Amino acid sequence: MDPLTRLELIWPGKRSNHSAAFPRLTADASRSYHSPHSEHRTASYDNHLIFGENLLALQSLKEQYEERFTCIYIDPPYNTGQVFDQYDDGLDHGSWLSFMKERLHLFHQLLKEDGTLWISIDDDESHYLKVVCDEIFGRHNFVSNIVWIKKSSPSNDARWISDTHDHILVYAKDKTLWRPNKLPRTQEQNKIYKHSDEYDGVDAQGVFYGRGPWFPGDMTVKTISESALYPITTPSGRKVRPAAGRAWVYTEERFRELVADHRITFGKSGNNKPCIKRFLTEIEEKGVVPRSVWHYSEVGENRNARQEVKKLNATNPFATPKPEKLIKRILEIATKEGDYVLDAFAGSGTTGAVAHKMRRNWVMIERGEHCHTHIWTRMKKVIDGEDNGGITKEVAWSGGGGFSYHVVKETN
Ligand SMILES: C[S@@+](CC[C@H](N)C(=O)[O-])C[C@H]1O[C@@H](n2cnc3c(N)ncnc32)[C@H](O)[C@@H]1O
């Protein structure tokens, strides 16, 4: 065991192990579904919907899918003591921890070497769950506790403090191997790039030339190097130096090259301290490093998720769905097209729907009857191109693909 995890969390029943079952996974072609449109059939896919207890399903997946998943996302019952329309959410604390522990071991085995596990959870169990995850994945493989601001308005009837965020615990199977994908820049982030150069323009054919909009970036750093304290004369004739305790980021020679290349600005008056022009065209493709707080304005809130599932099933909407945008953000960071994504607590099938639209392979497991009434029907709509909600437009999804359906049962 990794020396950092020697501090072990103990609870009654921790050592009992229920996982020595014999699962039997049976495919049922009559409930599998593939796009009837031939133009959609060309791309290869490997998607599976499994109806039944996830502990059994995960054990049976080990044979073919060990170390196959690039991303496992789960949204397990949070152990809030509530009863929802589609499932119950109340175990005693120790039983819930044992329940999670057994499944976490299997997630670990199913993850690829450079794969990651993402767990949605709230304050009821998150801190205990973190310690259990540390024990199984190793504290050194903990990546982040992402805070998702899940509500835009407070619950005014809260007795203590209005619960406004969920946690998303992120673990890498091997943190030395895993690197997150950068996120595309948003319009909001691009807004500050509004200055333009007199060197930009449109040629006779109407084609734009130049470097486009820029943002004036600081040209000083904290690290002091004597050679980077030289005076600079502004176009207006003023001599300027870096502020006390700072130095220019460029050598004098490099600075002159940048001036010659029109990459330095002294402001409209020509009298300001120099700034480096950061051109949007040059930084756009580099993307943005993911941050640990996710706001509902970027990734949706619970209310959006409820609207999404209501559109899919107006008479009996799923009680606790996640917004498609939230799952899209996770898959953007953790996967690329063609990778394998697993959700063993599928609920209304958000993970599969998003993974499908983003052209990832997926496996979903759900033991409730809503596996058929909600997930199956949702995935059919996605495949038939009849789901125009969630992230459909953003990722230009128009239908296609399919999935195989299986039932998992315990055998003697
Ligand atoms: C919070 S919901 C997941 C919601 C989902 N993320 C969505 O967007 O719709 C948790 C789901 O886990 C399912 N579940 C709980 N325990 C399970 C188990 N042992 N095996 C399979 N599914 C289970 C419940 O039936 C419920 O549908």
Image (cartoon, grey):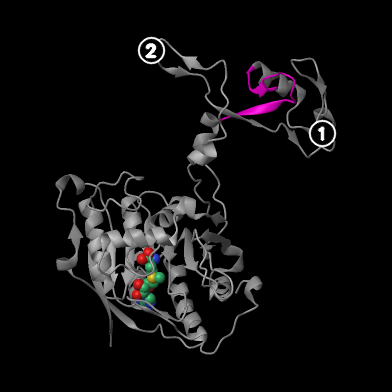
- Residue 267 included in the magenta stretch of the image: yes
| Mark 1: amino acid | Ala
Label 2 secondary element: loop
Q: Quadrant of residue 350?
A: bottom left
Disc on the earlier residue, 2 or 1: 2
Q: Residue at x 55, y 29 (%)?
A: 194
Q: Quadrant of the N terminus?
A: bottom right
Q: Residue at x 56, y 76 (%)?
A: 159
- Ligand 1's image quarter is bottom left
Q: Is residue 179 left or right of residue 220?
A: left
Q: Nearer the viewer, residue 139 or 371?
A: 371
Label 1 secondary element: loop
Q: Nearer the viewer, residue 165 or 398?
A: 165
- The residue wearing badge 1 is 243
Q: What secondary structure do most residues of the magenta stretch adopt?
A: loop
Q: Residue at x 34, y 69 (%)?
A: 347
- In the rendered image, residue 153, in percent from the top left (x then y), is placed at 50, 61
Total marks drawn?
Answer: 2
Against 66, residue 283 (above or below) is: above
Q: Quadrant of the C terminus?
A: bottom left
Residue 4 seen in the current view = yes
- The residue wearing badge 2 is 205
Boundaries of the magenta span: 261-279
Residue 362 seen in the current view = no
Q: Is residue 43 left or right of residue 72?
A: left
| Mark 2: amino acid | Gln
Against 69, residue 196 (above or below) is: above
Q: Quadrant of residue 365?
A: bottom left
Q: Residue at x 62, y 71 (%)?
A: 2
- In the rendered image, residue 72, in percent from the top left (x then y), is placed at 42, 63
Q: Tell me, yes or no, whether the two marked residues, 2 and 1, touch with CB atoms within 8 Å.
A: no
- In the rendered image, residue 270, in percent from the top left (x then y), is placed at 71, 18
